[in-house]
């Protein structure tokens, strides 16, 4: 594979800028998580969801007042659209199914809605605790398997930097959910676990190219690891962008046109796919290059040739790529 560009894009020479941007985003995400915290859906903390449909011209204020008069304690009311008809999605902390149904029936009656104009779903707190434990367990197992696989297939340093980039993506995604106070639902958790695979894919594609390029160069050739890393990113960059575009477009359409359940999944996926592309060349690869350059072999080459090669020797690296 050859680079698509006549002149290499300077990813690694701008590594400090990329890492600084990511650091700022992570800090902002952590601040949001600390100050505002995450909002969990009823699936995690228990409660009731009432889905009203065909509500006509009823306003959010009118729906909320009807629920309060029916006995609901501080319900969260959101508008929804189903089959081109206006509706509402109501969340409350009521965990008793009979009480929840009574409240929904009373609210519907006071608003003049039919008995079949709503659906009540009640979830107990125990189920949410089980989901939380299962999600945390799945995340930990996934991290361990990623480290083991990448370490065996490539090397330990690549596995650690890949995991750092992955956690970077997840933390920023959760930070956005904290700042926007968007509820975390099981669909969001599924999307976060999917993001892990997507983020790892982009990173491993770049790491594979770096590994191959490094193996076909010898100590006597004056290419530092920074140069090899930058050229390798350029080799796969168009492929990465094409993959991102083809993934983001359907997710974006799902986010705009899908129902509430799909939107929960699509928002996390959209954020994660964009961050996964960014972190592959803006976080994982720069961190790996910095770490690898401290090895004796690459440090010696860096010290000997870096001052004489301020930019990549494009022709020599392309020659190596053609002859692989």
Image (cartoon, grey):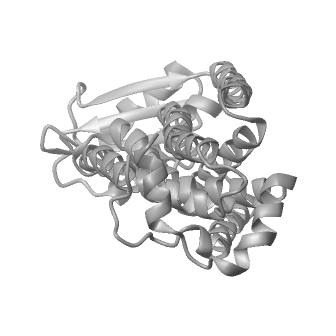
Q: Is residue 291 left or right of residue 142?
A: right
Query: Measured from the top left, where is residue 182 in percent x and y?
Result: 51, 52
Query: Measured from the top left, where is residue 14 in percent x and y?
Result: 60, 75
Of 35 and 82, the residue lying toward us: 35
Q: Count the labels in the image.
A: 0
Of 111 and 63, the residue lying toward us: 63
Of 240 and 2, the residue lying toward us: 2
Q: Is residue 310 left or right of residue 52?
A: right
Report the residue at 49% width, 44% height from top.
202
Query: Measured from the top left, where is residue 188 in percent x and y?
Result: 50, 38
Report the residue at 67% width, 21% height from top.
134
Report the residue at 51% width, 54% height from top.
232
316 in relation to 268, above or below: below
Of 155 and 3, the residue lying toward us: 3
Outermost left residue: 84
Outermost right residue: 296
Question: Which quarter of the picture shows residue 250?
Answer: top left
Is residue 251 visible to us here?
yes
296 in relation to 259, above or below: below
Query: Measured from the top left, where is residue 218 in percent x and y?
Result: 67, 49
Is residue 181 visible to us here?
no
Q: In this view, does 219 lie to the left or right of 95?
A: right
Question: Which quarter of the picture shows residue 31?
Answer: bottom right
Outermost front residue: 220
């Amino acid at each position: 594979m050859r680079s698509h560009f006549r002149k290499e894009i300077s990813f690694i020479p701008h590594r400090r800028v990329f890492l600084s941007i990511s650091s700022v985003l992570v800090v902002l995400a952590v601040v949001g998580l600390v100050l505002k915290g995450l909002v969990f859906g009823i699936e995690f903390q228990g409660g009731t969801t009432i889905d009203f449909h065909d509500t006509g011209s009823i306003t959010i204020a009118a729906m909320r007042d009807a629920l309060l008069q029916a006995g609901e304690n501080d319900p969260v009311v959101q508008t929804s659209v189903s089959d081109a008809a206006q509706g509402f999605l109501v969340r409350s902390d009521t965990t008793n199914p009979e009480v929840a149904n009574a409240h929904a029936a009373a609210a519907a009656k006071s608003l003049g809605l039919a008995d079949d104009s709503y659906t009540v779903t009640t979830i107990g707190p125990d189920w949410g605790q089980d989901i939380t434990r299962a999600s945390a367990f799945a995340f930990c197992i996934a991290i361990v398997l990623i480290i083991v696989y990448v370490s065996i297939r490539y090397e330990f340093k690549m596995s650690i930097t890949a995991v750092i980039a992955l956690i970077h993506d997840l933390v920023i995604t959760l930070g956005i959910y904290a700042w926007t106070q968007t509820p975390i639902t099981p669909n969001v958790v599924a999307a976060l676990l999917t993001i892990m695979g997507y983020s790892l894919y982009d990173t491993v594609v770049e790491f594979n190219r770096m590994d191959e390029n490094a193996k076909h160069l010898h100590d006597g050739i004056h290419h530092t690891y920074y140069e090899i890393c930058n050229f390798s990113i350029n080799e796969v960059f168009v492929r990465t962008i094409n993959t991102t575009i083809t993934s983001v477009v359907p997710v974006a359409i799902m986010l705009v046109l899908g129902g509430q359940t799909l939107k929960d999944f699509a928002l996390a996926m959209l954020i994660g796919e964009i961050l996964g592309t960014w972190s592959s060349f803006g976080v994982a690869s720069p961190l790996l290059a910095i770490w690898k350059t401290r090895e004796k072999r690459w440090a010696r080459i860096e010290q000997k040739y870096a001052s004489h090669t301020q930019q990549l020797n494009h022709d020599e690296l392309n020659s190596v790529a053609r002859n692989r």
